[in-house]
Image (cartoon, rainbow, N blue to C red):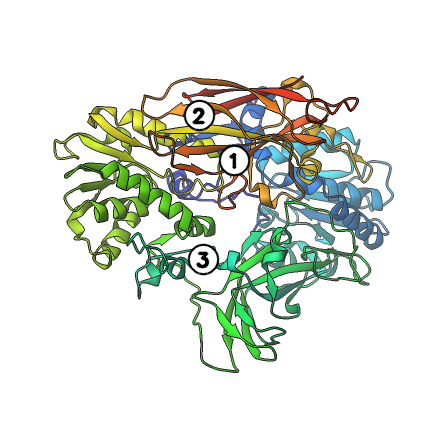
Amino acid sequence: MAALSRKTLFLGRSLSLLSHLARVDHSLPAIRTMSSGSPQRVFQLKLDPLTGNSEWVVIEEDEEESFAYKFQQPLLAMTSYLDMLNDSRRNRAFREAIEKTITKPCHVLDIGAGTGLLSMMAARAMGSGDSIAPGSGKGMVTACESYLPMVKLMKKVIRLNQLEGNIKVINKRSDELKVGVDIPSRADVLVSEILDSELLGEGLIPTLQNAHDMLLVENPLTVPYRATTYGQLVESRFLSQLHGLRNNEASLSDGIRLIPPGQDSVLSIKHQQYAMHCNPIREEIKLLSEPFKVFEFEFWKRPESHGETDLQIKATNDGRVHAVISWWVLQLDQEGTIYYSTAPRWIDLPAVTSSIDWCDHWKQCVWFVPGDGITTFKGDEICLRAIHTDTRILYNLETQIPRTEVLQHRLSDADLPIVLSPERIAIYGDREWRLSILKTVENVLQGKVCLLCLAADDSVFLPLLVAHLSERSHVISLFPGLGRKGLQYLQAVCHANGLSSDRIEVIEKGAKHLTMHDTHQKKADLLIAEPFYYGHDGMLPWENLRFWKDRTTLDSILSEDAVIVPRKGILKACAMSLPDLWKSRCCLRKIEGFEHSVVNTTLGACGHLPESEEAPCLPFFVWQCGEFEELSETFAVMEFDCSKQIDLCQGKSQVKFIKNGVCHGFVLWIDWVMDLQNAIVLSTGPDKRYWKQGVKLLATPRAVGPQGSRNVGESCSAVVEASFDPSNGGLKIVFDFL
């Protein structure tokens, strides 16, 4: 099994299957293929956010740089490479461990080499200033990287640092390497960093298994040396809302039950750990146990694919266990003097550097206790069973004293018709959001007896609500992403919501293929959406303007006085101080002595770049972006009128700063206006923790302040201009400080 580049998966399967996978999972953006005697090529997924259509774009190994940049930059800017390379604590720990471990010429293998940083550290540690020839006895470094765009970047970096003769770069997966073909002998040392926030998600175990079986000497040296995972039981109302929809629904008055009693399996999150920054919610967390050790993984020996352990954990407080927060500690050297940890800041780790900088490539993980959680009292013994597979760590939790509540946790999601993100579950359980939608639909239906309603998006709430409030209306749901699973879900819950199954119809067609035949020769009176498109959770807010595109496509089957909900979208923005995020995304120069400036443009860095090479706008949960502060009033940039057909939009707005500070960028989001009176607005702004915002970082941070502050060098206002291109869903944003 190869090391997997962050957010990129390479599979040796047919393109038709891969195309299907990519449609349902947007974390599969690229596939590498090889053919004997021909250049290697990358099939990179290109998604049109306004239509949901995707296509595979072929990138040949010998493509022109301009073409490669056109398709590589947006993809690589979305990965964790830049943030990881800006993590000075990580870089220093690996450099110190490599210098301590590699003290003489040997054969070093770097799996998942990325930009080649660890390979260059290993080459320097061997003390060779001259080129290293394989078999020369001077030692060698083999850098294995499966992702072709990253290989191109690595070769530039190695060339820039004049180490071309010292490092052999191989564009293959590690399980494709053959001793005697690709490398002359088994490697003496393995250096590798193929870890995600959960530790195992990038294929650590299969990669180590193959390396020990096929590529490494017996008892090799390794950097890192071992990793240990830890956990802690917590109570948190916020975390419980991210999975406990049924319990939240019980107190709501709209009459809809997305998870009716006894039907918990119809709608759920995946049974897995979720990466999340837990430090920002420390005040909303009650600790119910001391930290406990879960698993230990040795890099220097072959790991097992499956492991289980039973832990007896003593409760330190009365409370209700809603989640297990977990992290890992990396021991990089054999002696145990060099460590790196992803622990939250409330954990005291004497052996680890006390100054923990914010970074986004590794977070803590949260495993949600199914159901209502477990009630426990101080001193109770709680039995936790931990299980690890090749790529995941899962938990089973039950109390022993008192033994009144037992949870049986299934490891399979196969029986769940619909699996949603934790944030989407929380939205569906949010009282304010549900009330706003209820008022919107009630207003639309007022005075109307019989309607044909088209639900354009993947909302499972809207079809049920419209049918519930209007007994003679007929609802057609398109479910562009959920498809048949959406149909199965509605069939399962209609009766429990007092609805006959013929009241809601699911048509498995895209908007552009819908005809009057599908609507029974009737024109629709209501086109409605949240808007929510399944699989778009991690995308930029304005990519939900797909609803506007769908509205335009469906125009011929809408009645002349059809009501469109939402009525419009407003692009909102706010200037912010984002020092942690800016530092993690800023331009690279030297990393532990190795020049990396050639990667900045491709990885979407900000700071010290020409204006023509500005950083891209990227999606983030702003509340999880470390330190942040609003420096301006919230302002509207432009509007998208969904009552009309999709068209080019432009907007311009002046920014008025209200605080002194350093502006690192602008945060942007969409407010959806649901009614003609502009009275019901669903905001996706930074004060809402269930949506990602778009963040546009500045090339250079600017000192700002309110008008009249008179501080030298401060800007008291700025102008933001934006334009929306309906042909591709692109949003161009320009800032001008005055």
Q: Is residue 254 left or right of residue 428?
A: left
The span from disc 2 to disc 1 (Cα, nearest Å) is: 39 Å
Q: Is residue 114 above or below residue 246?
A: above
In the displayed orientation, state which residue is furthest to the front.
Answer: 708
The span from disc 3 to disc 2 (Cα, nearest Å) is: 32 Å
Badge nearest the viewer, 3 or 2: 3
- Disc 3 crowd, CA 10 A, few/some/many (<14, 14-19, 20+): many
Mark 1 or mark 2, which is nearer the start of the sequence?
1
Badge nearest the viewer, 1 or 3: 3
| Viewer can see residue 5 | no
- Residue occupying image coordinates x 30% and y 44%: 462
Residue 126 lies, in percent from the top left, at 84, 46
Which corner quadrant of the image does residue 494 belong to?
bottom left
Which numbered dot is residue 243? 3
Q: How many marks?
A: 3
| Viewer can see residue 31 | yes
Q: Which residue is mark 1?
A: 36
Q: Which is more toward the observer, 502 or 282?
A: 282
Mark 3 or mark 1, which is nearer the start of the sequence?
1
Identify the secondary structure beneath mark 1.
loop
